[in-house]
Image: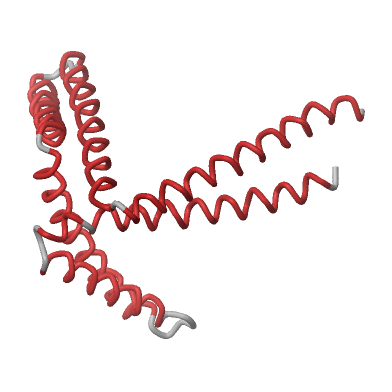
Amino acid sequence: MSDAATPLTDFAHRTVNWSIFLSILLILAGFFTLLLPFIGGIGLTIFVGWALIISGVAHLVFAWKSHTTGGKVWEFLVGLAYLFAGIYLILHPVAGLASLTLLLAFYLFFEGIFEVIGYFQVRPRHGAGWLLVDGLITLLLAWMIWRHWPSSSVWAIGTLVGISMLFSGFSRLMLSMSAKRVLKAF
């Protein structure tokens, strides 16, 4: 029985070590993205561009396979829209970054509104004030990005992605280190 557990334990040790390594890479990527947020924003814009191109091609394939005329036309038009948007983002990443930044400001605005509304729905519950704080901070961030747009394109997306990568890396590292401590018992 111990022979059967050994390969599984070895696999778990290798997996945890890879997880620690990848967490450290994510922390470093987040740190460098915070140092150079414009470059991080351009990288994200190009990534989104390629994702849109792949989605556009998928919609065009679905249009080809659709059995109804309305389905074919709709899938074809959606596919072209995705394809053109993706090509535009890749060919014009700075303008694309400005567009994505404005879209981010609108997203954060509506998210903040919904969080404030959510606060009023759960107000009697313990800790509901945090939802209001989150909504107000989100609205403030949306206002800051919109107020300084298009110059906010230089920092907004790259900074937010960098912070996200940094915190994701740290949380994954802590989880991996915790798993490593548990595995040492085996």
**Looking at the image, which residue is at 47% across and 57% down?**
167
Expressed as whole percent of the image width and height from the top left, the position of residue 89 reads 14, 36
Tell which of 113 and 94 is nearer to you. 94
Residue 47, above or below 174: above
Expressed as whole percent of the image width and height from the top left, the position of residue 7 reads 79, 26
Residue placed farthest to the right in the image?
1
| Relative side of 79 to 47, left or right | left
The N terminus: image quadrant:
top right
Residue 22, above or below 55: below
Image quadrant assignment for residue 20? top right
**Looking at the image, which residue is at 46% across and 48% down?**
28
Image quadrant assignment for residue 15? top right
Tell which of 136 and 50 is nearer to you. 50
Tell which of 86 and 82 is nearer to you. 86
Expressed as whole percent of the image width and height from the top left, the position of residue 112 reads 25, 69
**Looking at the image, which residue is at 33% across and 52% down?**
161
**Looking at the image, which residue is at 18% across and 61% down?**
105
The C terminus: image quadrant:
top right
Tell which of 38 and 182 is nearer to you. 38
Residue 185, above or below 88: below
| Relative side of 37 to 20, left or right | left
